[in-house]
Amino acid sequence: METTLIILKPDAVQRGLMGQIISRFEDKGLAIVGMKMMTISQALAGTHYGDHKGKPFYDGLVGFMTSSPVCVLAIQGVGAIAICRKMMGATFGSNADAGTIRGDYGSSNSFNLIHGSDSPEAAAKEIGLFFKDGDIQIIDRAIGGWVYDMSSGTPE
Ligand code: IDP
Ligand code: MG
């Protein structure tokens, strides 16, 4: 099981797309194990996007991410990190495939609706940045045995 950090960015919240985007992850069989609304501080945005410091878009990115509230989610499932990245699509809606979140809901080359961790290391770091111990729920889902084949004892 993996847990990934997803942020519904200010444009997704302002455009009223939270429900539709969260539904896609639930419909896929993934479990929402953490969720909150918050306004990201300059400091937190700087830490979260530290790898991009110095790039031409960095200041604009921090300005965008701190401009209005976001919805932060911890999403769990087998292979959840790669599955969520695939569902998000390419970085900008202008060239993201139809059927992906960015491809279906966006057309900007700057605003792009959603962040998702890109590796297990990034997911662990980002979940620690945005959630406190105890914020992530352990959910024994009644549907678990129908989302996954549990016949071997581990979810497949
Ligand atoms: P990703 O979110 O698809 O992993 P990255 O290349 O890691 O994309 O960039 C992180 C974020 O920085 C993007 O989601 C986007 O918000 C922003 N960003 C990246 N490149 C540009 C750009 O050229 N202009 C404006 N914003 C950008
Ligand atoms: Mg990235």
Image (cartoon, rainbow, N blue to C red):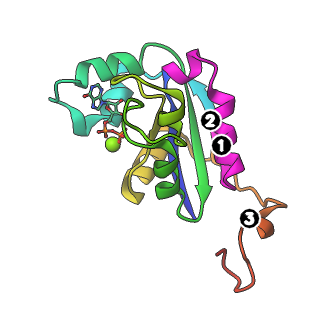
Q: Is residue 72 magenta?
A: no
Residue 39 in sight in this render: no
- Residue stretch in magenta: 11-35
Residue bearing mark 1: 24
Q: Nearer the viewer, residue 125 or 12?
A: 12
Residue name at image x 43 percent, y 47 percent: 117
Q: Relative to 120, is 129 above or below?
A: above
Dot 2 amino acid type: Ile
* Cα–Cα span, label 1 and label 2: 5 Å
**Marks 3 and 1: in contact by CB < 8 Å?**
no
Residue bearing mark 2: 21
* Cα–Cα span, label 3 and label 2: 19 Å
Residue bearing mark 3: 147
**Marks 2 and 1: in contact by CB < 8 Å?**
yes
Residue 38 position within the rendered picture, expressed as x and y whole percent measured from the top left: 55, 23
Find residue 81 and name its label. none
Q: Relative to 2, is 44 above or below?
A: above
Residue 60 position within the rendered picture, expressed as x and y whole percent measured from the top left: 28, 18
Q: Relative to 88, is 154 above or below?
A: below
* Left or right of 113 on screen, residue 63: left
Residue name at image x 75 percent, y 56 percent: 139
Residue name at image x 44 percent, y 51 percent: 123
* Left or right of 54 on screen, residue 2: right
Dot 1 amino acid type: Arg
Q: Secondary structure at mark 2?
A: helix
> In the displayed image of the protein, which residue is found farthest to the bottom?
152
Q: Secondary structure at mark 1?
A: helix
Q: Is residue 26 magenta?
A: yes
Residue 89 in sight in this render: yes
Dot 3 amino acid type: Val
Circle 1 packing at 10 Å, graded few (<14), some (14-19), many (20+), is some
Residue 61 position within the rendered picture, expressed as x and y whole percent measured from the top left: 31, 23
